């Protein structure tokens, strides 16, 4: 059987314990939260890198990436050469009302055209406004933080190693020509 007044004592003990703890209430929007730099806030599109391969749209589990494009013929680079065709982007949009911020589109893009930005203040009163078209997605690109520095102990990336070797070869060639 419970001792009379024990409930009140327990309640007071909890009150006293929590009174001395620091409050964790965030005073947003008066105080901005300190977010980690790689926070998944919104997705930016670097259009120049996009080849319209459609991989992101196909892999998106929510089907919320909308891409339209058309083909254009590029004239042959050399006389007698073959004409080539390339995809030209007409529309690229992401519906953030559907997006679940899984990041699959960014992971699968083979051409580094999609990036996370930590910006998150884009709430709308009209749900249609949450479909961000290519111009808006480009604007988000300017809020993408720099990539973290490479680990000094990491293996040199293949591209940098190849560029360095080519530059060294060219410098050696120029030196030989100068000495001759
Ligand atoms: S983050 Fe995920 S849900 Fe959102 S657009 Fe990319 S793949 Fe689709
Ligand atoms: S995966 Fe990358 S390159 Fe391909 S359509 Fe999407 S953004 Fe463009």
Image: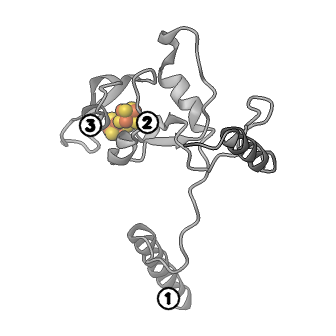
The residue that mark 3 highlights is 59
Q: Measured from the top left, where is residue 114 in percent x and y?
A: 44, 40
Residue 144 makes an appearance in the image: yes
Instruction: Find out if the beta carbon at label 2 lies less than 8 Å from the nearest ligand 1 atom.
Output: yes
Q: Residue at x 61, y 48 (%)?
A: 145
Per the image, the residue denoted by label 1 is 176
Of marks 1 and 3, which one's residue comes earlier in the chain?
3
Label 2, secondary structure: give it.
Answer: loop
Label 1 secondary element = helix
Q: Residue at x 60, y 23 (%)?
A: 122
Query: Picture quarter containing residue 26?
Result: top right
Q: Is mark 3 within 8 Å of ligand 1?
A: yes
- 51 and 13: which one is in front? 13
According to the image, label 2 marks what residue?
A: 101
Q: Cα distance, mark 1 to mark 3? A: 52 Å
Residue 125: image tag:
none
Please identify the quadrant where the N terminus is shown. Answer: top right
The local crowd at label 2, few if under 14, some if 14 to 19, many if 20 or more residues have their Cα within 10 Å, is some
Q: CA distance from mark 3 to mark 2?
A: 13 Å
Q: Residues within 10 Å of mark 3 (few under 14, many from 20)?
A: some
Closer to us: 105 or 90: 105
Sequence-wise first label, 3 or 2? 3
Q: With 161 as the anchor, is 1 left or right in this view? A: right
């Amino acid at each position: 059987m419970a001792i009379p007044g024990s409930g009140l004592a327990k309640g007071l003990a909890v009150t006293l314990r929590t009174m001395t703890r620091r409050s964790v209430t965030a005073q947003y929007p008066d105080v901005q939260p300190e977010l980690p730099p790689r926070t998944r806030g919104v997705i930016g599109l670097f259009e120049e890198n996009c080849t319209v391969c459609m991989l992101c749209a196909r892999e998106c589990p929510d089907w919320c990436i909308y891409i339209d494009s058309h083909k254009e013929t590029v004239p042959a680079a050399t006389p007698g050469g073959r004409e080539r065709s390339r995809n030209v982007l007409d529309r690229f949009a992401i519906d953030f009302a559907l997006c679940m911020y899984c990041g699959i589109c960014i992971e699968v893009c083979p051409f580094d055209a999609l990036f996370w930005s930590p910006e998150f203040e884009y709430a709308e009163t009209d749900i249609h406004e949450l479909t961000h078209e290519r111009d808006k997605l480009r604007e988000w690109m300017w809020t993408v933080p720099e990539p973290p520095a490479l680990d000094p102990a990491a293996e040199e990336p293949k591209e940098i190693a190849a560029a360095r070797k080519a530059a060294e070869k060219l410098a050696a060639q120029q030196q030989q020509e100068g000495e001759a």
